[in-house]
Image (cartoon, helix red, strand yellow):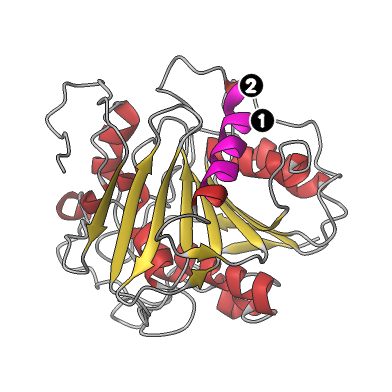
């Protein structure tokens, strides 16, 4: 099986379906800008915890990656292996605008899959320019439906018929919130958990609602804002939070920068990126190139996004670890400590 890598700038490779097995030994790319961000004498950051939400107590050593994204409404599929489970819960991971390469989020995807989840990564747009944003939601939903059907065939790990959770970044967060309301219209299971990381649509209006009061009562919603985000507006994120009045289990978090240690913590739009080149599908555009510059993996992942994602999955599926993701608790707010014992700036929290 060949995999095309040497493509020209901004070109998208023409690829047929393929499957790749990624071993634990694959390179996890972290700290791309670590040198430029470091203070010479700053204390180091916390390492990944050994257990608990965000922890490294993995059940599987490998990830199987399948490319079924030749069409705009296609998808990439990631399944746990070594050992291969008979069945697993499903997480839908909705990328940001033009972040069509799972590599940008590869560290997080690897974490989710090695924890025992199947991850569906809908494509939903052809490239950076040509797909109308009004088509994003229907394309994403088609990818989800087709992926769930695909998982019922062949040697795939079978999807557990249980609560669906969506993780969305940027425009993918807006799409996730939209489908959290309009799931029946698009024929997908109700997303019982939504983790929206810097959700927004910029100047565009596709997959955007005036209010979210029709979001179901039993949905659990977490919105994460970055204080130095200059890409999307906090006002849209507040609209989701403030108008989803029937969704009583909802919190709004704000990430703040912290330069006490090295490398410093940034609070930018792409804070949830976690670059891992083992997930590279060969696609390139300005958004993907930017992920090389900002896609660090650090305590904001381990004690932030990955922790909240794991805890949301546990909370939705089993009513466990809810205090790591909701309620303004220390477990939710904490981003760990620097090596000198000083706390990393905690998350700001708003509750209904």
| Majority SS type along the magenta span | helix
Q: Where is 124 relative to 144, above or below?
A: above
Q: Does 90 sit left or right of 218 as displayed? A: left
Q: Position of residue 322 (x, y in %)?
A: 66, 76
| 217, above or below 89, in the image | above
Q: How many marks?
A: 2
Residue that protrudes farthest toward the front in the picture: 154
Q: Which residues are magenta?
A: 134-147
Q: Residues within 10 Å of mark 1 (few under 14, many from 20)?
A: many
**Tag 1 and tag 2, C-beta contact below 8 Å:** yes
Relative image position of residue 238 (x, y in whole percent): 71, 44
Could you tell me which secondary element the residue under label 1 belongs to? Answer: loop
Q: Which residue matches tag 1?
A: 207
Residue drawn at x 83%, y 44% as measured from the top left: 243
Whether residue 248 is visible here, answered yes or no, is: yes
Viewer-closest of 257 and 143: 143
User: In terms of secondary structure, where does tag 2 sit?
Assistant: helix
Which residue is the extreme one toward the left? 6
Residue closest to the eye, 74 or 102: 74
Q: Which residue is mark 2?
A: 134
Q: Which residue does the image show at 68% across and 46% down from the upper left?
A: 188
Position of residue 181 in the picture relative to residue 130 (left or right): right
Q: Residue at x 19, y 21 (%)?
A: 9
Q: Is residue 142 magenta?
A: yes
Q: Residues within 10 Å of mark 2 (few under 14, many from 20)?
A: few
User: The C terminus lies in which quarter of the figure?
Assistant: bottom right
Q: Residue 324: where, in percent of width, then height?
A: 59, 76
Q: Nearer the viewer, residue 257 or 221?
A: 221
């Amino acid at each position: 099986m060949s995999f095309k890598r040497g493509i020209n700038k901004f070109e998208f490779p023409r690829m047929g379906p393929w499957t790749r097995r990624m071993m634990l030994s694959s390179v996890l790319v972290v700290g791309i800008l670590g040198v430029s961000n470091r203070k010479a004498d700053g204390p180091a950051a916390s390492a990944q915890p050994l257990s608990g939400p965000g922890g490294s107590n993995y059940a599987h050593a490998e990830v199987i990656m399948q490319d079924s994204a030749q069409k705009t409404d296609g998808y990439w599929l990631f399944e746990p292996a070594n050992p291969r489970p008979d069945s697993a819960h499903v997480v839908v991971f909705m990328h940001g605008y033009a972040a069509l390469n799972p590599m940008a989020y590869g560290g997080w995807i690897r974490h989710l899959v090695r924890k025992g989840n199947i991850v569906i990564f809908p494509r939903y747009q052809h490239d950076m320019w040509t797909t109308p944003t009004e088509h994003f939601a229907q394309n994403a939903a088609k990818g989800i439906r087709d992926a769930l059907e695909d998982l019922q065939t062949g040697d795939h790990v079978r999807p557990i018929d249980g609560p669906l959770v969506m993780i969305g970044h940027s425009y993918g967060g807006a799409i996730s919130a939209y489908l959290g309301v309009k799931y029946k219209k698009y024929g997908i299971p109700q997303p019982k958990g939504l983790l929206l990381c810097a959700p927004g649509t910029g100047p565009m209006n596709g997959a955007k609602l005036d209010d979210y009061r029709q979001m179901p009562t039993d949905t659990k919603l977490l919105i994460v804002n970055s204080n130095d985000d200059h890409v999307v507006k906090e006002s849209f994120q507040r609209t989701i939070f403030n108008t989803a009045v029937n969704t009583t289990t909802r919190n709004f978090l704000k990430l703040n920068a912290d330069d006490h240690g090295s490398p410093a913590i940034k609070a930018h739009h792409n804070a949830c990126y976690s670059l891992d080149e083992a997930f590279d599908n060969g696609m390139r555009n300005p958004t993907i190139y930017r992920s090389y510059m900002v896609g660090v993996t650090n305590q904001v992942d381990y004690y932030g996004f990955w922790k909240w994602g794991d805890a949301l999955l546990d909370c939705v599926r089993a009513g466990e670890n809810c205090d790591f993701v909701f309620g303004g608790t220390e477990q939710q707010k904490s981003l760990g400590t620097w090596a000198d014992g000083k706390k990393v700036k905690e998350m700001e929290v708003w509750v209904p």
